[in-house]
Amino acid sequence: MRGFVKRQDFVELSLLESVHGVAIHPNSDDIGVEIAADKIILGRPGGLTLSSAGVAVERAATAVRPIFDIEEWKKNQAQRFVGREDALMLAIAAAEPDQRPQARLDLARFYMAWGMYQEAKGEAEVILADPGAKAEESIVRMVHAIACIVIGRPGQGLKDLASPAIGDNYDSQLWKGLAYAGQGRWAEAREKFKNVDFAIASLPLELQTIVTLEAMRASLEVRDYAGAARRRSELDVIGVPAATRPAVAVLRGRLAEALGHDQDALDEYKFAVNSSDRAAAAEAKLLEVVLRQKRGEINQAETLRELETLAAIWRGDAVEVKTLQMMSRIYSETARYPESLAAARGATRLQPNSEASRLAQDEASALFTQIFLSPKGDELPPIEALGMFYEFRELTPIGRRGDEMIRRLSDRLVAVDLLDQAAELLQYQVDHRLEGAARAQVAARLAMVYLTNRKPDRAIAALRSTRIADLSGELRQQRLLLEARALSDVGRHELALDIISNISGREAIRLRSDIYWASRQWRESSEQIELYYGERWRDFKPLDAAEKSDVLRAIVGYALAEDRIGLARFREKFGPLMSGETDRLAFDTASRPGAASSAEFAAIAKMAAGVDTLEGFLREMKARFPDAVAKAMLPAETAKPEPVSTGSLPRIIGLTRADAAR
């Protein structure tokens, strides 16, 4: 049950690499083979030709040699540890300077035989730091690379293997495969392991077990179940130490599960879970929970409970990453969105380059997008949605979808009067994410939020900083109306009127009325209201609350301007449509000639002068430019009714009492 590790070339024949048995390539037709009980004799009638010494030496310089001598390895293990270590250290102390690197290399190999790879790594580093150890550099770097890979530093091991001093010597492809497996690069690892069976067979049994175990894991990760089964058979032949049996049981369970032998897989997992190997137990527990859920033996709540327990007791490796990935998925399915995103973030921070982490991150990004761009997240209260956005805003997609997500969130915040937060989101878009017409459009939305929040100066700044020449007519009109309203609010009434002088439409008429009212030009404001309602007085349908409020404001304006003609005309038009005792009494009082000096009219005029016209303007803008307002549906308990009207007057109860007293 032996083979040839490397190809051996002679004059008349070549012995090929083999795992089991002897493969002969004859260069001469009369090569004969004689098989005995314990040997194979190769010859020819005239005898074999010997190679010249020069050729042999030249070939030996480039031959690939095994790095470990099995006999020396067994000798190191057979002797007492302390005595052998002391002897090797004394040999180092007594060696000449040029012989000291070889003495230290013997000590490093001794540590390797006892599984003390950190100590072997340290000895190799001492040798490499010696400038006089160039002759042994290749073998020392190889020992250092193997030690680094076995103790979990595959990156450093690959750097050593890339050294020109090593090249293809000492089975470097085998150890590159082990390093790739340590980095989770399973496809590359499998390719390296696939063609080095002969090299594995030349290793000491302890290293054979480590390498074969990782080769089996690599085959399972790339779903090469035939290769994994072959590696399992190799482990049976090699023999598995007791300390390694739990890890082997996990791989056996994975192979059995892949082949459809679920019960065998569960038995293997159970053995590993009950072992003292905590790493194997954690991985086996995860696999067992997944398999039992797939078989319907546990429900989703029980699965989540098991995963949460595992995530709490085992941290820091690929098992935790896969656990967090599964938890994130279950949290998402049960509408526990913050927990789902937090679990995905934890997996990404732990191993950002692993396949499981990337998958969890992709799922988290998709969930985040669904929450803020689809009805999926409409059930969330706006406060919770805002908190989730700020906590996980690194998941915001780039480009148009990310911009739309921020705008929708700002709309939801505006709908519940979180105006500062909404303005902050839109201001960031204007400052950093958008250009051109899109920036101007979002700036118009931002200006409306600032107006709603009683910050007209910021609305003006947002509009002026985003001016461009080639805007569509509708967007340009919207921005002009917003700028005129903001200028009026800061007291620049004449400039506001100039800006909208060439704009028509109901929203422009109402805005002119508001500007005239703010500048105390009562008659002009009332005339704009009369123009706004046009032929409404011909309709015998009673006025609603909003219309009554506007009519009262107009009649007060005519009275304050002492425009008797306008007052009579307006009274004749809208007097018959005023219904309700209180509203009709207020209308009659305000429209009576000479009433401007009465106490009742003073009360009505004072309330009318203090009316805020902003809500009516914003309502007109929402009706005229629906793209500038929120589209997100709010829960019933957070939805607020629309204000009654622009400048709606409170009910004047005192007038009724005064009339009754009179």
Image: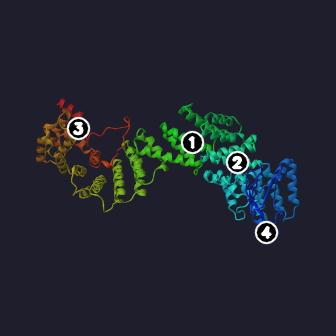
Q: Measuring 87% from the left and 52% from the top, which residue is drawn there?
A: 86
Q: Earlier in the sequence, mark 2 or mark 4?
A: 4
Q: Nearer the viewer, residue 580 or 362?
A: 362
Q: Mark 4 points at which residue?
A: 55
Q: Are marks 1 and 2 in contact (CB under 8 Å)?
A: no
Q: What element carries label 1?
A: helix
Q: How far apart are marks 1 and 3 (CA)?
A: 57 Å
Q: Looking at the image, can residue 348 be seen?
A: no
Q: How many neighbours does mark 4 have within 10 angstroms: few (below 14), some (14-19), or many (20 or more)? A: few
Q: Answer few, some or many: residues within 10 Å of disc 2's Cα (few below 14, many 20 plus, some between 14 and 19).
A: many
Residue 212 disc label = 2
Nearer the observer: mark 3 or 4; the answer is 4
> What's the residue type where badge 4 is placed?
Val
Decide if residue 657 is on the left or right side of residue 363: left
Horizontal relation, residue 227 to residue 619: left or right: right
Amino acid type, mark 1: Leu
Amino acid at pointer 2: Thr
Disc 1: which residue: 324
- Mark 1 or 4: in front is 4
Count numbered badges in the picture.
Answer: 4
Res. 436 image quadrant: bottom left
Q: Which residue is drawn at 22% across and 55% down?
A: 503
Alpha carbon distance from label 2 to label 4: 36 Å
Percent across and percent down for residue 466 are: 35, 59
